[in-house]
Amino acid sequence: MDFQLTERQTELVESAGEHYQRTLKPLAEDHSQDGVMRLRRKMAEAGLLGLNMPEEHGGAGLPLLDTLLVIQKLQSLSSIVGGLAHRSSTGAIGAILELGTSEQKSFFIGGVCRGEFGVSIGITEPEAGSAATAMKTFARRDGNGEVVLQGKKQFVSFVDHNHYTLTYCRFGSTGRPADIGAVIVPHTAPGFSHSRGGTNMADERLFELFFDECRVPAENVLLDGNAFGRLISVYNAERLGSIARMLGSAQASFELAVAYAQERKQFGRELADFQGLQWMLADMKVKLEAAQLLTYRAASNAGHGLPSRSEVSIAKVFTAQAAREICDDAIQIHGANGYMKEFPLSQRYAEVRGGSIYGGTIQIHKNMIAGDLLGRSNNQWKRSDNRS
Ligand SMILES: Cc1cc2nc3c(=O)[nH]c(=O)nc-3n(C[C@H](O)[C@H](O)[C@H](O)COP(=O)(O)OP(=O)(O)OC[C@H]3O[C@@H](n4cnc5c(N)ncnc54)[C@H](O)[C@@H]3O)c2cc1C
């Protein structure tokens, strides 16, 4: 085991930070649709999209660990930049890389890496949150080279800035996971619409998607059933990308707290002189490093492949809690300043708070960890309604 970053990894992270300061920072304030497209294109020019996507499709070809290091760094500087790096690397696009046809890979991965468009991921439905396999959105092939979708998704991120949604849906009616496949739905498809979006604590919009006899070319079918297990295996890389974003937000909060403790004076002394606050800073450092090690282990063991489900769940459970505590302590160290919206800390807290909910809640990840350690399937379905 080697716990040191290589010279190349350190350079990668530094170079991402320099790119941000030099070219991305002025664009990152503009969250309009045009603004995000400009940012995307600039990130593409800098090689900061499609970090782990193969070079033949326009990506940077990095292993998963290096990808996460760059996502973490960019997230520590700007959540929108970190989000774009994540979504274009470990997001829905990962499923297309692992499971798509060569035409799908070339078109979708190429377009995402060039900053031409983005792909959201639609899994959650009103009656299918943690119980994702209860989804009802249904797809049928119409025999004329199209697939027709009927149903509804909710809480889907970034739909206003993206151009496609990788939509999980059922191709059969047994009610079992074996029915589940996925279709890449263009947001211009007839019968597709979305809500104006609700705003979450971190000021991001989450959208409802409506599929009303929505017609999509059959070549956009990623998998037409028997795919839930494979989709979720790929989704573990997406989970690691969002864990790296939590690390970035926690790292930024920690660095602000360290600086503030050495600037702010009370009782004629720096806050950093008080042992009660020194111990808080020490605890924050311990949590950040432990969360990083668990996350980097999962990524490092994956290499260029897919991470272990169990290692991802362990990293997720620990990081979601550690990041929340680090951001909360950073607010405390800043006193009333930390609680003000004008300071970035409430935003950072809100960013990491969502991490206990999206990508599988921490309770669901604990169910999976316990299932693995006890050697049980840990099926959560009520016995009379078993859909496993
Ligand atoms: C910021 C953010 C972004 C998101 N982006 C997307 C997206 O892009 N695409 C998408 O498809 N979805 C997205 N989601 C939705 C997310 O995946 C769901 O919120 C999540 O799966 C939980 O579902 P739910 O909200 O319906 O909660 P529920 O499933 O209703 O759970 C409610 C509570 O019950 C607990 N619970 C449920 N079942 C069990 C059990 N068996 N054991 C123990 N506890 C249990 C949960 O842990 C939770 O605390 C996003 C959510 C957030 C917060």
Image (tube, rainbow, N blue to C red):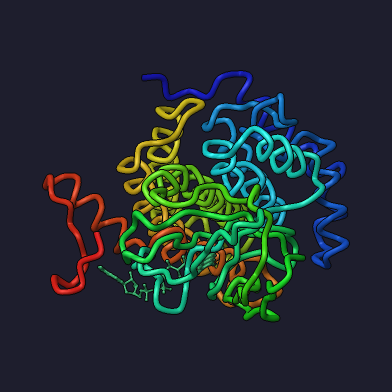
Instruction: Tell me what residue is drawn at x 31 percent, y 56 percent.
Output: 365
Quick check: 313 left or right of 163?
left
The total number of labels drawn is 0
Q: Nearer the viewer, residue 181 or 333?
A: 181
Which quadrant holds the C terminus?
bottom left
* Residue 333 visible within the image: no
Residue plotted at (17% across, 72% down)? 382
- Could you say where residue 173 lies in the image, as x and y percent from the top left? 37, 66
Q: Is residue 312 left or right of residue 137?
A: left
Q: Residue at x 58, y 76 (%)?
A: 200
Q: Nearer the viewer, residue 137 or 202?
A: 137
- The answer to whether residue 179 is visible is yes
- In this view, which residue lies farthest toward the front? 143
The picture quadrant where one finds residue 157 is bottom right
Q: Quadrant of residue 201?
A: bottom right
* The image quarter in which residue 198 lies: bottom right
Q: Tell me: residue 86, above or below residue 7.
A: below
Residue 269 in the image: state x and y as whole percent: 56, 61
Q: Quarter containing ligand 1?
A: bottom left
Along the line of sight, which residue is nearer the eye, 346 or 98? 98
Residue 144 versus residue 293: which sits nearer the camera? 144
**x then y, percent, for residue 53:** 64, 33
* Quadrant of the snapshot with the N terminus: top left
Q: Would you place residue 72 above or below residue 352 in this image? A: above
64 left or right, relative to 363: right
- Give above or below for 94 relative to 25: above
- Picture residue at 85% right of the left edge, 46% below the top: 41
